[in-house]
Structures are given as C-alpha cells and as structure tokens.
Image (tube, rainbow, N blue to C red):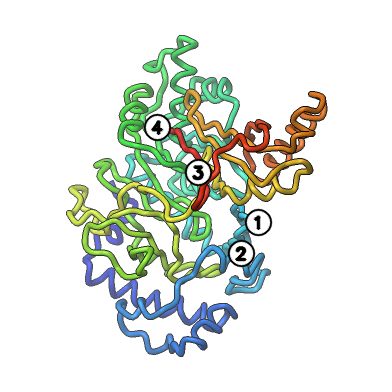
Amino acid sequence: MYWEEEKECMSRDDLEQLQLERLQSTLFRAGTNVPFYRKKFLDQKIDFEEFGSLDDLRRLPFTTKDDLRGNYPYGLFAVPLREVVRIHASSGTTGKATVVGYTRNDINTWSHLVARILVAAGLTKDDVIQIAFGYGMFTGGFGLHYGAERLGASVIPISSGNTKRQVQIMQDFKTTALVCTPSYALLLADYMYENNIEINALSLKFGLFGGEPWSEAMRSEIQSKLHVLATDNYGLSEVMGPGVAGECRERNGLHMAEDHFLFELIDPKTLEPVGPGEVGELVITTLTKEAFPLIRYRTRDLTRFPPESCPCGRTMRRMSRVLGRTDDMLIIKGVNVYPSQIEEVLLDAEGTQPHYQIVVEREGRLDKVTVMVEVMEAIFFDQMKKQRELVEHIKSRLATELGITVEVKLVEEKTLERFEGKATRVIDKRTL
C-alpha cells in the first residue's frame, strides 16, 4: 500500500531533479530571508544562485544545535511571525530551547508525510489510532495526530500516562493501532498480563513506535505480547518531527522522505562522506520547509543507509534504526536529556559539590534516572529534615528543567570515583 505511489516509487533521476529544484528554492529562501545564512554564505563566498548540482551541497556550511540556540527564539525563521501558525520547541542544555515554526503549508506537508509512514506501516482510514505520546511543545503527539487525521482514520488523542485508562480505552473504543514509545508499549503489555486482560479480545493490529532507542529483541517481544505488527519511525523536532522516515511492512529499514529532505552520512571527525553501507552521522537539509529551513543540519544521530532495494517497491533510500549518538545526549522516556542540564541545576543548589554521577536503568519497562551528588560534610551529617529539603529542591528543579522526574541521592564527599581524564558522568545500565 502506498499513500502516493507516483512519489514513493519515482525513478532516481526524477527524484534527484526534484531535489535539485527544491534545494535551489530553499537556498534562495534561506539566503535571502535568514540573516544567519545570509552571513554564512557571504563569509564563505558562496553564491547559492550558481548551484547546479546536488554535489554542490558539500560546499555549504553545516548547521548545528548551537546555531539554533544562538538564534533563539525566532532568529532562523524565514517568514514573518504573522505567517507562522504553529510553534514547537525542544529542551536545551542551558535553558534555551530550540524553537521551530510552521507555516500553514508546513503543517500540511507534515501531516502528509506522517500519513505516508502510517500507510507504509499498513494503516488505512478504517483504523482507530490511539496516540499515547505526550502533546504540547513535543512534536510527537501533534505530528502523528494530524497525520492520522489526514489519512482519514479515527484518532484517540489520549496523550501519555494513566496506564489503566489507556487499556480501558483500548477495550471500549476498539483501538486498532497504538502509537507510543516502545518501552511504554511493553509496560501496557505487562499491565494487561498482570490484570488478566485477554490480549486477543482487543482489536489491536498495529503498533507505531519511536521517540527512544529500541532493538529487534524489543520489537519481537512487543509483537509477541501485544499481537501487533510493530514498526519504527524517525523524526526530530528541529527538522519537522515524526514523518522524516518510517518503516514499511517489510521492517528492514526506514524509508526516508527524500522528496522533502536531503540526507547525507558523514564521518563526525573528518566531516567527509562515509562509504556505501558504512555508519555515519546523519545530516539533513530541508527542501520544502517554509518557516524554518535548515541547511546541512547535523543531527548527531549515527545510522547507515542499507544499499539493497526494498521488496515493497519504494525507491527512496532507507536508513537503519539509529545506532547511537555522537554527543552525550540521553533519551529518557522519549525526552532529550543532556548531563549539562543536570549539572547546571546541581551546581546551583547550595551545599552541593561539583561531583555527581547519573545512573540510568530500566526498571520494569520504563527508564529510571538516579542522580547521585556529593554534598558538603555539614549537610550530609545534618538533620534528616534538611537533607530531605535539599533532595526535594533538586528534584523539583530537575523536573522543571528536564520535563521528567528523576531520583536524587545525596552522598558523602569523595564518595564518587575521580578520573584523571574526562570524567564519566553517565552510567547507562539499560538493556534494550
């Protein structure tokens, strides 16, 4: 099944011609309307009007998340704010979020691309789709919601959390497709097993999962326990949100929306392209974004492009599931978390020492984060009331900064291991 077969199965020659035309349009929009890019092009003596080949893309400068933060909030917008109908944002490492905007055409494109990955996964307008992603500034909930509506399916915008109610809604509303993080899908499966809820009595057929790393072993477990066809999808707030790439029913890689984005894989050290089939850092250039065009955006995500074609007939290239990161970002319960965010809160709390460790574990089906921080001797041996007050203060600040709840443990001075070189701040004990 295809959402629009003529686009998803177009020849490479036609696709590359379309990409070039759209790249030229994007470069004109960014170089004319975005001071950041206008200065970049001028400094590097780049005349974007002379671009006549996709190979010329390598002459362009990279864009990084620091560039987005440095132009907070609207510095990279290519249209006046009156033309922006939606604003989303992701968390930042120093309190500055990365802010993205959408024109009405951008929203239409977004919903269209999400509908494409839904159809590739097997869904139709006859499905009832339960979206258990959080809504709000996070792009996941709204992106999948509007894509499902574009498809014509029935949408249940239940949002995240409240497991008991999630299951009740599945039973009562005859949910056929579940959209959430893979870890939450397993939590739902465990809840149903513990409460003697018969899976076969549900109407579930499909599961579309993303927002966090997961493995083939997790896929097999989800499919076995929930009796669904589980597919992966990829997106990032800075570029668009969900819909950038998604698996078809073959489940052998995520088809990339190459008619709307240019994808590169580079060696993160040399910044040169990697060889065919090799792992590299994913770099994305938007081709149709009006409000917020991005040129050669370094995602920091490591992946590879499988060289073989897909039996489904789609001609757009595929990417493998994200294999890791080139920076220290953690993904906890679908939320991007940087150790520097935690460090800033800890060092701002009176009585703490500049020594801490972040332990990430999988407790049951969900991620658990424990922050261990050294405190001054006077506090550690002070009355329990003051210790509890400090713990609650740090937990509250971290919840506000990160958007998730973490545990905090105070430890004595010189308790945590010291390192001669770069300190190991994060111990990730999760197994997928």
Q: Residue at left 65%, top 68%?
A: 74
Which amino acid type corresponds to the residue marked 4 in the rendered image? Thr
Query: Where is residue 362 shown, x and y percent of the image?
Result: 48, 29
Q: Residue at left 32%, top 85%?
A: 52
Is there any visible trace of residue 113 in the rendered image?
A: no
Say which element carries label 3. strand
Instruction: Give the image quarter of residue 57.
Output: bottom left
Q: Earlier in the sequence, mark 4 or mark 3?
A: 3
Q: CA distance from mark 4 to mark 2?
A: 32 Å
Q: Compared to 198, does 170 lie above or below?
A: below
CA neighbours of label 3 inside 10 A, class few (<14), some (14 to 19), many (20+)? some
Q: Earlier in the sequence, mark 1 or mark 2?
A: 2
Q: Earlier in the sequence, mark 3 or mark 2?
A: 2
Q: CA distance from mark 4 to mark 1?
A: 29 Å
Residue identifier under label 3? 331
Residue identifier under label 1? 94
Q: Compared to 308, does 152 lie above or below?
A: above
CB contact under 8 Å: marks 1 and 3? no
CB contact under 8 Å: marks 1 and 2? yes
Identify the image quadrant of the C terminus.
Answer: top left
Q: CA distance from mark 4 to mark 3?
A: 13 Å
| Foreground pick, 22 / 351 | 351
Q: CA distance from mark 1 to mark 2?
A: 9 Å
CA neighbours of label 2 inside 10 A, class few (<14), some (14 to 19), many (20+)? many
Which amino acid type corresponds to the residue marked 3 in the rendered image? Ile
Query: Where is residue 181 shown, x and y percent of the image?
Result: 47, 36
| Foreground pick, 66 / 223 | 66
Residue identifier under label 2? 69
